[in-house]
Image: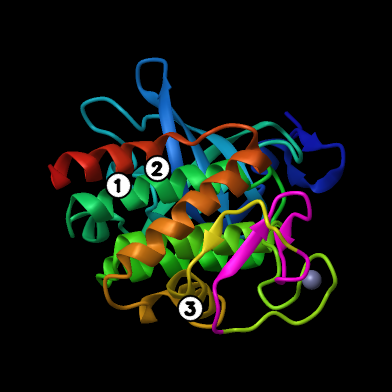
Amino acid sequence: MAEAVCYFSPVLPFDRVLSMALFATEALVLRGHKLGETSRIVVLLTRERGKLRAVARGARGSRPRYRSALEPLSEVRVSLYGRQGADLLRLGEAELLRSAFRASERGLETALFLSSCAELLDAFCPEGEAEDRVYRLALAVVHAAEAGTNPALLGRYLEAWLLRLHGLYPPLDRCAGCAKPLPSDAALRYHRVAQGFVCEECGPASGPLLPVEAHALLRLVFSKPPETLVGDGAAASQALEAFHRDLIGAHLERDLRAPRVIREVGRGSAR
Ligand SMILES: [Zn+2]
């Protein structure tokens, strides 16, 4: 019997074409949920193609195929199958490059930061659109968490950069009203109408007011790698957290779950 050949690639037998991966890429696992008895659907942030979904057959059950490679924020190398542009691909191999387990072992706060990190990335990243800088940012904060950087400061770092890379962070050095330079060593006054920080003459600003320490932290965030953030920075971090929550909420038109859990846990441990 003559071998069946693929109509668009006469040199390759049809079954060979079906068994070829659409592409291979590095990825961060963002989340997953159950599918049927033994499979999972995983949401991956891939370096090559941005965020996408794939079915991981055999990921569950008594002998799960991928073991811990599909845990949230694990760094993996995957091969993906399916039609170009399909909503749902099929996961082939998933090689674990770096487990998120070592970072989450650092304690509850770091584990909560990681879940918030996965949720933020998922919310900000459009499907099927590669964003190299976002991918590198995600890796950098996860590695810094593993190295023991303060998770609250890392949270502000990730939020500020995600907002900035999506064109949503107001400039720190220029008045949004009159474009005059703003001092680098003073509090920042946000004005909602102008959607930016304003100088004294362009006030009164609606607020919030970001104190000098928060401004200093922001300057560090926008000029240094995340693992260099040291110290407690609790007051600065709190001021920025509320500000970022407003900017993120306005962009996504919803509140995120993980930051609320972190606040509730924080209140519980402060009692
Ligand atoms: Zn002004």
Asked which secondary structure carries label 2, the reply is helix
Find residue 113 and report its horizontal and vertical position in percent: 34, 52
Residue 46, image quadrant: bottom right
Neighbours of disc 3 within 10 Å: few (<14), some (14-19), many (20+): some
Q: Residue at x 30, y 47 (%)?
A: 112
Of residue 256 and residue 124, the one placed in the foreground of this image is 256
Q: Earlier in the sequence, mark 1 or mark 3?
A: 1
Span of residues in magenta: 185-202
Picture residue at 23% right of the left edge, 32% below the top: 63
The picture quadrant for ligand 1 comes to bottom right
- Residue 35 percent location from the top left of the image: 44, 20
The reply to whether the magenta stretch includes residue 3 is no
How are the colours assigned in the image? rainbow
Residue 266 in view (yes/no): yes
Q: Quadrant of residue 131?
A: bottom right
For disc 2, the marked residue is 259
Q: According to the image, label 3 marks what residue? A: 216
* Label 1: how many Cα within 10 Å (few below 14, some 14–19, many 20+): some
Of the residues shown, which amino acid type is indicated by label 1? Leu
Query: Where does label 1 land, which residue?
Result: 112
Query: Could you tell me which secondary element the residue under label 3 belongs to?
Result: helix
Nearer the observer: mark 1 or 2; the answer is 2
